[in-house]
Image (cartoon, helix red, strand yellow):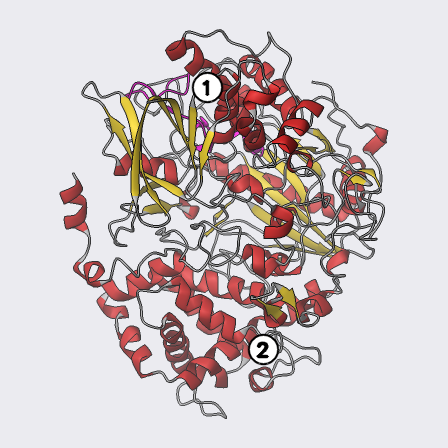
Amino acid sequence: MRDVIVVGSGGGGAVVAKELAARGLDVLVLEGGPRFDRPADDWTHFEFDANHPFTGFLRMGPADRSAPAFAREVPQNTVILQVAGVGGSTTHYFGISPRAMPGSFLGYAGADRNLYDTHVFPFAYRELAPYYEWVEHTLPVQTAAMGTKEEIFLDAAARLGLPVQTSKDITRDAFRPQENAILQPRGQAGKTTDARLLVFPVSQGCTFCGHCFQGCSMPLHAPLNLIAKRSTAVSYVPMALTANAWMRGGKAVTLIADAFVTRVVVDTTGAARGVTWRRGDGTRASEDALVVVLAAGAIETPRLWLNSGLPNPNDQVGRGLTDHFQDLLIASMPFDTGLSEGPPSGARADFPGRGCLSNIGSPPAIAAQVATLSDAGMAGLYNNGLPGGTLGADTVGRLVGRELKALLSRLDRLMAVAIFTDDDVETHNRVSLSTSLPPDAHGAVPRIEVHQRQRSARTLANREFLVENAVRLMRAAGALKVHRLHWPPLLSHVHSTMRMGLRPDDSVLGADGEARWVPRLFVADNSSLANALGGTNPTLTTQALATRTAEKIFRRYFGGDPWVGREAPVSSVSTAVTAAVLRATL
Amino acid sequence: MKRERESSVSSDALLISRRTCLHGTALASVAMALLQVPSLRGWIGAAHAATGGVVEETLGALASFIVPGADPYSVQQGVQMPEPGGVEAGAVQPLRVTLDAAVPFVPSFSSTVAAILNDLAAQVHPGIAGPFTSAFANVSFHEKAVVFSILESIEPLKALAGVLPAVTAFLSYSEVGVFDPATRTLSGRPVGWTLTGYEGVADGRDAFKGYFENRRATRS
C-alpha cells in the first residue's frame, strides 16, 4: 500500500510527486510514455526526428518508437500537440510561465471584472500567489533574455503606446519580456556557435540554439537538473527522485515509465483505492494507495475517469475544454529578425479580459507546418466562409505554392505573433469516449470535439480584438506583408476538462482539487483549471495549483501541516539538488 | 456500462482489428467516416484499384501543389519554380508512409487519399488528359485548389483538407530526405534549409542581445 499514486509525470503530476516526496510520503509515479534519461544522447535537434506526429521522439505514444502512437478520435480539422513521457508536454513546451489573469478568480473586483468568463476559480487570486512564488523559485522562472525577435516585438509594443508590465502579476493592458522557465545564459551561452565552448560549465543556461520544441538538452554535459529549459523532466522529476537527499525527512519517489494506467480502482465506499496499469510489454499490474492523483493531461485524465466507470452525475467530466482559440500571424520583414534563434518566445503583451499576444520563433519545418494550418481556406484561392476578417492583414488562410515558398524563403526575416484568446468554458467542447474507433489496449479511446464555429460571442470578439492588435503591432514593427492563418483548433494549451468550480452542478472538482464524487481522488493537471486563465499559458498556474493540491492532500489525509509561506522553497538548480542528482547518476 | 459502450461501436469498426487500430488522429476519423458513410465508401473501393504508380503521382502532385519546384508535377500544374520543392526535398515517399501509418486499419490509406484527390480532380476537370495516370497530377494549380475547396465542403473530409497541406509542408521543409534513421544523422543539406536560408541545427548561437531595459528580474 502506497501513500500516494500519481498518474502522469508532466507539468502537474511531477509537482505533486515532488512536494509529497519532500514530506516523506511513499509516492509511486506512473508514466504512460518513455523516460528520457539522457536527453543529449537520446535526442537530436532534427525536426523530423523530434516532431513527426506519429514517429517523432516527442509524440503521444509508447516508449517503443516502432509502435503506433496512442489512438485519438478527432472529428474535425484539429492539430493536437502533446507529448507522452517523463516531463509530458513540458519536454517540448516553450517554457513560457506567466501568472493567470486575476479576473479569472473568485472575488475579483477590478473595473474590468465583467470582461471575464463567469466560470471562475473557486478561491481568490491572492490565495494562489504564494504558490506561484514557490513554483517560480523552484523551477526557477526568470525574466527572458532577448534575441533580435524579442527586441523587435518589445520596441513595436512601446511604439503602440502600451506601458511596460513590471510585476509578475498582470494588472493592465501592457507588454513585457516573458517570464520563462528557462535559465538565463551565462558564460559563453548565447555568445558563440563554437561547439568547444558550448559545454557545461563554460556555457550555462540557454545557449540560444532555438530547439526548445525539439526538447532541450543544452548545454552539453550539464547535470540533468541544470539543463536550460525547465521541463519537469529536469526540474521536479529529479527532485522527486532524490527527495531523500536534499530534504530532511524526504523519501525518493518510485517512477515507472511506459506504464499506462487503465483503471482507477475504488473501494466499497466509493473512495479511490488504487490503480491498474498496462506495461509496454502488454503485462498488467496494480497497486493500492491511500490517495490517487490524476495528472495524465486534459485529454487522458477524463478518458481514464470514464473508462474506470467512475461517477459522472452532472455529465461534466470531459466537458468545458478550453484551448485559447489560438491563431497565428506571420509577417515578412525588411530586416533580420532571428526567427530561428533563441527560445521560441521571449516577449508578450497582455490584455486582461481579452487574452495575450506572444512572439514566436521556429526552425523551418514547424514554420512551414503552422503556415499551412487554417480553417479559412487557402489565401488568395478560396475561403471557407469562416467568420473573422483580415483586420489589417494582407491575406487570410493557409499559404500554399509560390506564396508559401516566398514567405519562407527568408526564415530569419519573418516575424510571428501567436494569439491566445481568453475563451469561454463551453460544454460542447469536450473529451468523451469514442464510439467510432474501436478500443485500444488501454480501453475506449478519447474523442476530442472542438466546435470551432460555435464559440461564444465573447470568445469570438476576444480573438478578433487580439488579431487586430497583433496586426497593429507587426505594422509598427515595420512589417511588409502580414498573413493571418486563421487557425483551426490547435491544441497545445488544453485545459478545464475536469474543471474545479464553485458549483457542484457545473464542475468535477471541489476547491481543493478533490473529485466531488470520489473521495481520495484528486486531479492535478491542466484539466483541473477552472477556465482559460484569461488566455495566459497554463503550465505555471497548473504547477502552482498542483502545489496547493499537494498541501491539501497532506493536510487532509496525512495530518500534516502546510509548508508554502512557512518554509523557504528549495530551487531545482541549487547546489544540494545538483549534488543529489550527480550522486544518483540521473 | 462496458457492454453499452461496446454495443454502440459500429459494425464496421468491429471488423477492424483491435491489434492494428492503435492510432487515431484527424486522419483516423476521416477514415472512419469513409467506412461508415455510404456515399463516401466508393473511395475505399477506388483505392483498391489504385496502383502504386498512381499513388506516387498523386502524392507527388500534392507535394508540388504545396511546395512547387522544378519537378514534372510542378511543370504540369503550370506553377513551377527554379529552386527545388517538395518533390526534390524527398517528401513524397515519407508522405505515403505517414498517411499509411496514420490509419493502419485501412489498407494503404495513402491509396484512399489518392483516390479521393483523383476523383475530385476528374470532377473539377472532366476528361482531363495529360502525361500522368493521376487526374490530380494532370490538372492545373488552380484546379487543385478547387479540389481542396470541395474537400473542405464535405463535412467528414474537412479534416483531411486541413491535415494534408500541413503534413506535406512539414515533410517538405524537414530533414526527411537526407535523414538516416539508423544513425540519426544527415547525409546532406536538407532542401528545406536551403529554401529558407536556415543555418541548420546547432548546439548554440551567437544571438543573445541582453535584457529589456537591463531588467534581469521581475518583482512579484
Q: Residues within 10 Å of mark 2 (few under 14, many from 20)?
A: many
Residue A137 lies, in percent from the top left, at 66, 22
Residue B206 lies, in percent from the top left, at 83, 49
Residue A386 lies, in percent from the top left, at 48, 53
Say whether residue B181 is visible. yes
Residue A284 lies, in percent from the top left, at 29, 42
* A536, A184: nearer the viewer: A184
* Position of the N terminus of chain A by quadrant: top left
User: Is the magenta region chiefly helix, strand or loop?
Assistant: loop
Q: Residues within 10 Å of mark 1 (few under 14, many from 20)?
A: many
Mark 1 element type: helix
Kind of residue indicated by mark 1: Thr
* A189, B125: nearer the viewer: A189
Can you say whether A450 is above or below B76 in the image? above
Mark 2 element type: loop
| Residue at mark 1 | A549
Q: Is residue A193 left or right of residue A342?
A: right
Q: Is residue A422 left or right of residue A281?
A: right
| Residue at mark 2 | B87
Q: Residue at x 24, y 50 (%)?
A: A435
Residue B108 is drawn in which quadrant? bottom left
Q: Is residue B171 left or right of residue A470?
A: left
Q: Residue at x 30, y 22 (%)?
A: A505
Asked if badges 2 and 1 are on one and the same chain, I answer no
